[in-house]
Amino acid sequence: MKKNNIRYVVLAVIIFLTMPLLLSSCDEEKDLSEWEVSYVYIQRENWTAIPQMVLTHTPSGIEGNISQNFFVKVNKPVAEDITVHLAVSCTGFDAEKISLSQETVTIRANELCSDIIEVSCSDYEFMAKNKEEATYSVNISIKAIEPNSDEIRISDLQNTLAVNIVKKAFVSMKYGVPANSDRPNIRTDWKVEVLTSGVQGLPTDIIDGQTWTMLKRTDGNELEVAFDFGSKKDLLGVMAMHQYSLLPTKIEIFLSVDGIDWKSYGTFEHGNTYNLPITFLSPVQTQHLKYKILESKQPGISLTEFYIYVPK
């Protein structure tokens, strides 16, 4: 009996000594349910809106606004402040161009939401180098939180705010009469030069106010005409008139300070219309302009009258 008692005592001592280790091991292996964890996540201010921003590209540059407001939230409050560190990454451009109103954010104790945070970009003229449509993206993510424990974690599902940016293709003109404009009918001080060979008609036929006199070409679909307005004009757009059976489908406009060095203002495509009013998206000041027809609906092309739009 004495030996058995000694064995029991030794066993009890071993159990007593190892119990803390066993309890500690159980604690480490304990998995908290999702209801017991407070998850930190990102949410846009207007969470129903599509996170996409569209920028236009005109001769004035890139126009639009890259700005998005968001919060850092926790799904249930905790009894201490949560400090959240944010990180920025971009696709298609340098992340240094993106600004955050706060890079370190606090969710105060017993609250669910941080103060509002703004992500913005003040300089996106770098996009102007590309005349084609382009897509860029900005990602704001939760880099770290303090405290970071089993009870307070970063959400795996909502730890990033993604913003897509679409820069539209370069456009310099649109169809229609410019707002608040006049179309002078007197063009006697203009000089007109036809730059394409094989064209029927006189240069003055397109500034005489008569639609039955014209420049006409039947052996091709390109026609280029240069205008000297006699003095600098503030142009809001132009009006070209064509014979209905010989319509252009694509034109290009060039501008020049001296009539020697020309710079393209852009191309414009349109459908079937013999009166073609064009609005310049950015008004220009020039004395010299070239109107070049690049493509037509069918072989042959015409130009019956040409006007400019100036401010009222």
Image (cartoon, helix red, strand yellow):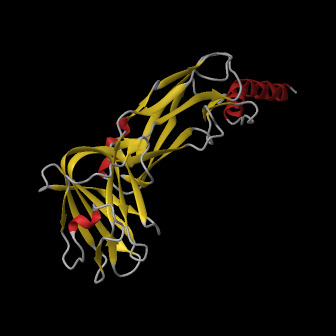
Q: Residue furthest bottom?
A: 219
**Residue 171 at least partly seen:** no
Q: Residue at x 24, y 74 (%)?
A: 201
Q: Nearer the viewer, residue 129 or 173?
A: 173
Q: Residue at x 38, y 53 (%)?
A: 173
Q: Nearer the viewer, residue 225 or 214?
A: 214
Q: Nearer the viewer, residue 23 or 176?
A: 176
Q: Nearer the viewer, residue 108 or 120?
A: 120
Q: Quadrant of residue 25?
A: top right
Q: Quadrant of residue 283?
A: top left
Residue 74 at what x, y percent from top left? 65, 28
Q: Is residue 92 left or right of residue 186?
A: right
Q: Is residue 197 above or below residue 230?
A: below
**Residue 179 at least partly seen:** yes
Q: Residue at x 39, y 55 (%)?
A: 278
Q: Residue furthest right?
A: 1
Residue 234 at what x, y percent from top left? 28, 42
Residue 147 at what x, y percent from top left? 57, 23
**Image quarter (top left, top right, bottom left or bottom right) of the C terminus:** top left
Q: Is residue 148 above or below residue 92?
A: above
Residue 220 at what x, y percent from top left? 29, 80
**Image quarter (top left, top right, bottom left or bottom right) of the N terminus:** top right
Q: Is residue 182 left or right of residue 86?
A: left
Q: How many marks?
A: 0
